[in-house]
Amino acid sequence: MLHSQDFALIAPRTPLSIFSMHLVVIAWLYVTLMMSVAEASHSNGTVLGAALTFLLYGVAPIALMVYLMATSKRRRAMKAREAAAQDKARRVAALAALPSVEPDASSHAPAHHAIAPVREEP
């Protein structure tokens, strides 16, 4: 029995395989559109039946398939957004931990400077 890991080794996802998935979607919608046209143009068929055929045989299954196939892509995008948010929070925390370099408003020398003040003789 083949598992998803085995299939990934057999046929890795390339731009060509993504294109073929789009081709399958377009082809299936074309087939269901032709089924709908055949039903609408038949003597016993109705336009309502044709619309339901297109929606239930074409649009609904394709929408479900595309949603399920895009789950891994959405999951990767969500993890990337979370990683970017964590990285940003880490950078903001690192910047907040740095000592302030703003000038002191008082007349005293800042405490974190290593230069001793010059002493004046009385």
Image: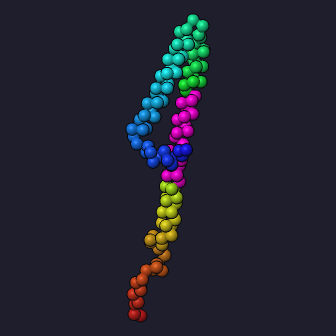
Query: Magenta residues: mostly which secondary structure?
Result: helix
118 or 88: nearer the viewer: 88
As drawn, 26 above or below 109: above
The residue at the point 50 percent across, 17 percent down is 34
Span of residues in magenta: 60-82
Q: Quadrant of the N terminus?
A: top right
* Outermost residue toward the top in this view: 43
* Outermost residue toward the front in this view: 1
Q: Quadrant of residue 59?
A: top right
Q: Quadrant of the C terminus?
A: bottom left
51 or 69: nearer the viewer: 69
The residue at the point 40 percent across, 90 percent down is 120
As drawn, 43 above or below 54: above
x then y, percent, for residue 79: 52, 52
- On whether residue 30 falls in the magenta region, the answer is no
Q: Quadrant of residue 45?
A: top right
x then y, percent, for residue 35: 53, 17
Q: How many marks?
A: 0
The residue at the point 49 percent across, 67 percent down is 94
- Can residue 52 be seen here? yes
x then y, percent, for residue 40: 55, 11
x then y, percent, for residue 86: 52, 58
* Outermost residue toward the bottom in this view: 122
- Can residue 77 be seen here? no
Q: Quadrant of residue 54?
A: top right
93 or 79: nearer the viewer: 79
The residue at the point 52 percent across, 39 percent down is 69
